[in-house]
Image (spheres, grey):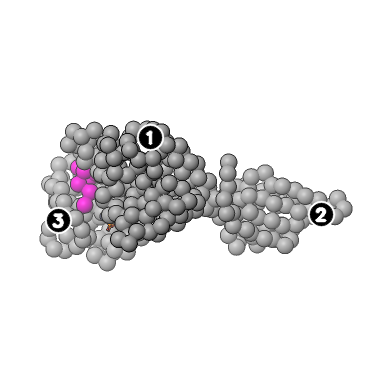
Amino acid sequence: MSASTESRDRLRIAIQKSGRLADPARALLGACGLSWRESRDRLFCYGEALPIDLLLVRDDDIPGLIADGVCDLGIVGRNVLAEQDLDRRQNGVAPAFRELVPLGFGGCRLALAVPDDWEWRGAGQLANRRIATSYPALLRNWLAEQGIDADVVTLSGSVEIAPRLGQADLICDLVSSGATLAANQLKPVTTLLDSEAVLAGPVAEFEGERALLAELLLRRLDGALRTRHSRLLMFQAERAAIPRLLPLLPDAESPTVLQVDGADRLALQALCHGRLTWQRLEDLKRAGAQGLMVLPVESMLA
Ligand code: ATP
Ligand code: ZN
């Protein structure tokens, strides 16, 4: 381990400076109770509430910063982490970082996309074709698994226009809605990797003060991720309606039931982990729920 890692008793997390993961990453860490004082160059944010600092960087730099011990943790797409991990392995370099927790945002997939007029009949079709990608290690690994010999053309950006420019026959790129592909007369045909933002950390365990801080952060992260879709549902109902209401709450932790007046009128509180859609609330109302109220959950401690 480098000297810089040994001498620090603060935790340092690398996140994307700007881009798709920047805001959700900050919001999630904020929901864990972290706050920062920003430096003038906006590259380093000094942790105020806890000794946990942020480094704002390009997403591609995050795995390397963890490998070098410059940062302890990072929030980065699984696609970037897996690509750089495979690249290291393919070059005989020891693994240095790993995925710790999937974070549920930044969802996308690494997919092969072919020109619209291709009729896709499977991987066999790819022999000796040129495939443009920014993910050469993941693509080579997949081609090897399929037993296909194809030509990997590595590009750092604008992969989707490569077929039109005659640089490649097809591409291997990130897809979310598919709109960018469609705009370039391409269609996704097979997925190599399902991706989302993840918390990444070193292969080695933390030691000392930073181990305690990392443990605290992971515990809070777990709570923040669980509360993200959780809602407290409150309503009143006649006792006789309860058997009709409970089946509509399969995702609720055992509801708290209070007697309101007499024996027949009850007030219920249920912590729901699934989505409380309008449809579901209307179904509950029809089944006898009155005065329905849905409240967001600020924090939860298991
Ligand atoms: P940087 O300047 O930090 O290098 P970037 O251009 O590489 O930024 P973004 O486009 O912001 O990165 O994407 C960051 C991550 O967002 C991707 O690595 C991926 O994990 C995720 N992502 C989600 N949907 C998509 C998508 N449709 N296209 C590209 N990335 C996506
Ligand atoms: Zn990038």
Residue at image mark 3: 168
Residue at image mark 2: 260
The secondary structure making up most of the magenta span is: helix
Residue in the image at 36% along x and 46% along y: 12
Q: Residue 154: horizontal and vertical position, in percent?
A: 16, 51
Point out the stretch of residues depicted in magenta. 134-141
Kind of residue at badge 3: Ala
Give me the C-alpha separation between circle 2 and circle 1.
52 Å
The quarter holding residue 9 reads top left
> Would residue 209 be found to the left or right of residue 136 on screen?
right
Badge 3 element: loop
Kind of residue at badge 2: Val
Assign ligand 1 to one image quadrant. bottom left
Q: Nearer the viewer, mark 3 or mark 2?
A: 2
Residue in the image at 33% along x and 38% along y: 7
Quadrant in which the N terminus appears: top left
The furthest residue to the bottom: 183
Q: How many marks?
A: 3
User: Which of the pair 152/97 is nearer the observer?
Assistant: 97
Let me know if residue 195 is in the magenta part. no
> Would residue 190 be found to the left or right of residue 300 on screen?
left
Which of the marked residues, 1 or 3, is nearer the chain's N terminus?
A: 3
Give me the C-alpha separation between circle 1 and circle 3.
44 Å
Which of the marked residues, 3 or 2, is nearer the chain's N terminus?
A: 3
Residue at image mark 1: 206
Residue in the image at 23% along x and 56% along y: 114
User: Which of the pair 67/84 is nearer the observer?
Assistant: 67
Q: Nearer the viewer, mark 1 or mark 3?
A: 1
Q: Residue 297: horizontal and vertical position, in percent?
A: 59, 54
Does the image show residue 206?
Answer: yes
Q: Residue 296: horizontal and vertical position, in percent?
A: 59, 57
> Would residue 294 be found to the left or right of residue 213 on screen?
right
